[in-house]
Image (cartoon, rainbow, N blue to C red):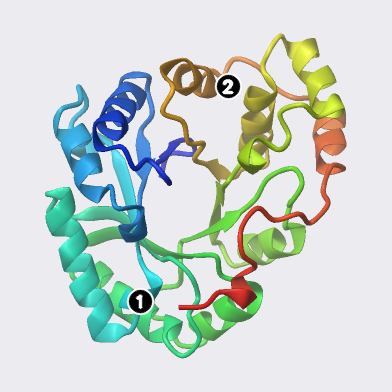
Amino acid sequence: MPRFGLGVYKMTDKEEAVKAMINAIGEGYKAIDTATIYDNEAEVGEAVRNSVVKREDLFITSKVWNTDQGYDETLRAFEASLKRLGFDYLDLYLTHWAIEGKYVDTYRAIQRLYDEKLICSIGVSNHQEHHLEKILATANTKPMVNQIELHPQLTQVPLRNYCDANDIAITSWSPLARGRLLEDSVLSKIAEQHHKSIAQVIIRWHLQHDLMVIPKSVTPSRIKKNAQVFDFALTQEEMVMIDGLNQDWRSGTHPDDIKV
């Protein structure tokens, strides 16, 4: 899985979404992260078919929504996602949230799809350690990815350590804390030192922590700038300074509080 890609959450304007995705692919983005609830899987498929990059050279992720969870329900939801995308396989398919009483059966269905070679990689999203422990207790193929909210004000170190110990890669959603950090004085000083934007510094922080990161933008200039993060490196001191911004602040719902 590429470590850098485009998140498409809240890309609700169909034409704008397709243009943004095609633009991102043209700028070198190799991954697109969508979900059933985003209501833009069809646009992802359209963008891929109209891009300059072959389908097999891109990494497309989608997720089963909460109301579609359960064993049989997940199989049907996956089939519907493939139809909307216009693909015959997915690179990664995730359980969107751990819905109590359903997420284990949901993951069991995802394992079946993996065994049938309809999915190249499988995983979960917004799963805490206790959710993962329950899945790992019975899984034939353990989750390869856990996609969680993660940014400098929500570093999630204990969960990251648990996933690392179990060879589960982490993808950061809301990696820029929904813009909350774009005027932070610590980040501003670091950005000035590298002649980069604060957003670029934050993305670089994710990459140097070996996290996969999926910033979202529909603005061509930001899409381009967000990808220009491979020509500099943060020092260890700067990484520690950014780590120190943690406040355990969430922009989204805590996984233990999610409802169907």
Where does the image place residue 137, in percent across and percent down from the top left? 52, 87
Viewer-closest of 36 and 5: 36
Give SS at disc 1.
helix
Left or right, 206 with respect to 57, comes to: right
Give SS at disc 2.
loop
Which residue is drawn at the image coordinates 34% and 27% (left, top)? Answer: 20
- Image quadrant for the N terminus? top left
Relative height, residue 233 to residue 120 (above, below): above
Where does the image place residue 165, in percent across and percent down from the top left? 65, 65
- For the question of whether residue 199 can be seen, the reply is yes
Relative height, residue 164 to residue 173 (above, below): below
Identify which amino acid the numbered label 1 is placed on.
Thr
Residue at the top extreme of this rendering: 195
Which residue is drawn at the image coordinates 51% and 80% (left, top)? Answer: 136
- Indicate which disc, 1 or 2, sits on the residue closer to the N terminus: 1
- Marker disc for residue 229: 2
Relative height, residue 93 to residue 23 (above, below): below
Q: Nearer the viewer, mark 1 or mark 2?
A: 1
- Image quadrant for the C terminus? bottom left
Residue at the front extreme of this rendering: 13
- For the question of whether residue 117 can be seen, the reply is no
Identify which amino acid the numbered label 2 is placed on.
Val
Which residue is drawn at the image coordinates 20% and 22% (left, top)? Answer: 52
Asked if marks 1 and 2 touch (Cβ < 8 Å), the reply is no
Viewer-closest of 147 and 66: 66
Q: Quadrant of residue 163?
A: bottom right
Left or right, 48 with respect to 38, comes to: left
Q: Which residue is mark 1?
A: 67
